[in-house]
Amino acid sequence: MKTTRRGFVGGASATAALLAGGAAQAQAQKGKYDEGASDTEIKIGHTNPYSGPASAYGVIGKAEEAYWRMVNDTGGINGRKVKFITLDDGYSPPKTVEVVRQLVEQEKVLCLFNPLGTPTNTAIHKYVNLKKIPHLFLSTGASKWGNPKEFPWTMGWQPDYHTEGVIYAKHILANVKDPKIAVLMQNDDYGKDYYEGLRAGLGKDVGKIVKHATYEVTDPTVDSQVIQLKDSGANAFFNITTPKFAAQSIRRAAEIGWKPAHYLNSVSVSVATVMKPAGFENSQNIITASYLKDPTDKQFDNDDDMKAWRAWMAKYNPGANVADINNVFAYAVSYTMGKTLEQCGNELTRANLMKQAASLKKLKVPLLLPGITVNTSPTDFYPIQSVRLAQFKGESWELFGEVMSSESA
């Protein structure tokens, strides 16, 4: 700060007060920061399986990279450019630990944003909370991400798997005559969360589950498991799989002539990476839960959000598949993160970032279904708690029924 000396009017104490006031003013202008933020930049860390068994989700990280390019091109967040650092963890928990340590201890990011996967986020859950690193808007719906009392630095984003499982259970009981339920599930916390939701939703009818089979992410196929499930005599199938295995199981069920009422978890509903590879003819009438506008659903062709998203895709993510709903997911969750950072103003501390993340009230996020908003509080770390059911018809998903929340489930 440049000052002009006019003598010691008021003495040394007045000069000190003047300097202190100037310093405070400069500090107020510059803002308050933790590692990873400054007057000019905000560093965000991200992990994604660009390789490995869940690499179909790699498009999410690429789309998020494109989103932050758009943000920077349009002035950044309150004048600060976002430096988005995304690393490949191969959907391998030990690798996730390694790259997250790199992001936190070497890159010194302000926060982690939307790291993907239940087992991978589980591996870093205690570490990031011990380090007090905001672990925000995770790309997994495990119910454990909404526990602010024990893990105050971790927050999910999408509807939780347990609630989704409850909703499918209620629909099966109401719509499948004399249901005999078979379950295919990934053998980890992600699979178990969905499965426990199904069991809770069935309540006294839990005995209607006649068979459940598991697979490991390293398995080449789930063909043998699908055959076992058919042989159980089941007429309802809850399919808890990531995209590669979802496509395999849909195709295999058709090949062996098994036609149960089929419920597919919402994390594997991409038309581009699941339904088309499985075969549209094999995918008919599958039911899922939805909270995002699907780009293959013609009812949204003239929707303003969808038009803006398509224009963004054409400019910033031109090589990506517009039929892949993961690109919609990436845009919507990135918008939520951008708004949260914006609300921080010039106080870009980790504590304030978590405070703002826990203060989202009826936030309208582009590409969420009508009637669904983002809501959080210091005691509610489940931002999205509503879904609608959808059924696959022709070459796209068709919504049906009303918006349902965890309460209505």
Image (tube, rainbow, N blue to C red):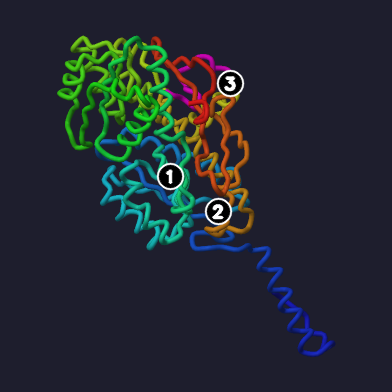
Q: Are marks 2 and 3 in contact (CB under 8 Å)?
A: no
Secondary structure beneath label 3: loop
Q: Which mark is residue 49?
A: none
Please name the amino acid that badge 2 sits on: Leu
Would residue 388 be found to the left or right of residue 248 on screen?
A: right
Front of the two marks 2 and 3: 2
Quadrant position of residue 48: top left
Q: Which mark is residue 303?
A: 3
Structural distance between the alpha carbons of marks 3 and 1: 32 Å
Front of the two marks 3 and 1: 1
At 48% from the left and 57% from the top, the residue drawn is 110
Magenta-drawn segment: 289-303
Q: Which mark is residue 353?
A: 2
254 within the magenta span: no
At 47% from the left and 46% from the top, the residue drawn is 155
Q: Quadrant of the N terminus?
A: bottom right
Q: Picture coordinates of residue 58 (x, y %)?
A: 35, 37
Q: Compared to 161, does 145 lie above or below?
A: below
Q: Compared to 280, does 341 lie above or below?
A: below
Secondary structure beneath label 2: helix
Q: Which mark is residue 145?
A: 1
Q: Picture coordinates of residue 211 (x, y %)?
A: 22, 23
| Labels 2 and 3: the sequence-earlier one | 3
At 29% from the left and 29% from the top, the residue drawn is 241
